[in-house]
Image (spheres, rainbow, N blue to C red):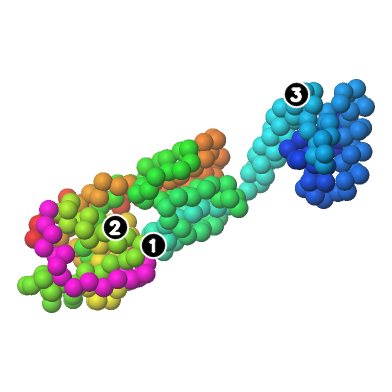
Amino acid sequence: MRHLKAFHIFHVAASSSSYSEAASKLNITHGAVSKQIKVLENHLSQALFYKQGRNVYLTQEGELLKGYTEQAFMALNMGVNELAQLKRQHLEVSCEPTLTMRWLMPRLSDFHQHSGVDVRLSTAGGPVTLGTSGLSLAIRRDDFELVHDYNKTTLVEEWVGPVCSPAYWHQAQNDVSKIKLLHSQTRPMAWDSWSSLYGDASLLGNTHQTFAHFYFCIQAAVDGLGAAMGSYPLVVDELKRGNLIAPFGFVSSHHNYILLSQKSAPDALEQTFTQWLQQNLSQCVPSEDERAKGL
């Protein structure tokens, strides 16, 4: 296409209040913007801008052309992104911190061996904006309102219950009022929610200790400092190793772990990772024997 450079400069200038602003966005001079706009106006035999004070405004013809250049450059940008994805062999994934450290990271080598895909993790919880710094996917607990219209894939139902070390339970089982309840600042109502679901609030009168993060809370339980409220995927490995036990079993929290992705069709890497997550997290639910047993 002739004058493609001029069309691009027009596209930027059309969303700017002045040629100087457009020049700053394009990192060129004011004169270069003015010259390219004039080239385009001569080529089309149409005035595209008119000046009023220090600002420039689109003519009726300019408004019409702006609609087409927005479509054209958006399509071009999408094409460039798709080409980049063809070469991409990594995924940028945001995941809740404790799920990252307690469940996902120990299993990533298995995923890499299976797929050859490198997963680059960042840790965060709650609302997320995908696309930021190339972020493709986000793994979350669905305890917050989604502010973006993303695809939401359910990975596994969450089950929760108090967990502690076997040695700690051996000391406390004859008098549960002596169990210290370990809390995290990130989920301060975890014990209250469990008590409501379990149907017994008697433990809430026990002594309490609070940690900054859920990860520290679980580690404190492993170390015998008290009982933490365990989300099953976060404690399943420690249960299997015998470092933790769940003397009261687990109840459904009525929440799920979910995967958030953008509305556009997932690429092959995203599909592969999603299927792997679903397959592996689907196994992270308590057996019938592990579910709530009663005080």
User: What is the secondary structure assignment of the residue under circle 1?
Assistant: helix
Task: Name the residue: 14% across, 65% down.
Answer: 203
User: What is the secondary structure assignment of the residue under circle 2?
Assistant: strand
Q: Quadrant of residue 226?
A: bottom left
Of labels 1 and 3, earlier in sequence is 3
Task: Name the residue: 54% across, 57% down.
Answer: 120
**In the drawing, what numbered circle is on residue 231?**
2
Percent coordinates x, y for residue 123 in the rendering: 47, 60
Percent coordinates x, y for residue 79 in the rendering: 69, 36
Residue beneath disc 1: 98
Q: Quadrant of residue 3?
A: top right
Residue beneath disc 3: 64
Q: Which amino acid type is shown beneath numbered disc 1? A: Thr
Of labels 2 and 3, earlier in sequence is 3
Q: Which amino acid type is shown beneath numbered disc 3? A: Leu
**Nearer to the camera, 126 or 107:** 126
Q: Which amino acid type is shown beneath numbered disc 2? A: Ser
Task: Name the residue: 22% across, 61% down.
Answer: 191
Span highlighted in magenta in the image = 199-217
How crowded pointer 1 is (Cα within 10 Å; few <14, some 14-19, many 20+) is rated as many
Percent coordinates x, y for residue 222 in the rendering: 28, 72
Contact flag, marks 1 and 2 (Cβ < 8 Å):
yes
Task: Name the residue: 70% across, 38% down.
Answer: 77
How crowded pointer 3 is (Cα within 10 Å; few <14, some 14-19, many 20+) is rated as few
**In the drawing, what numbered circle is on residue 152?**
none
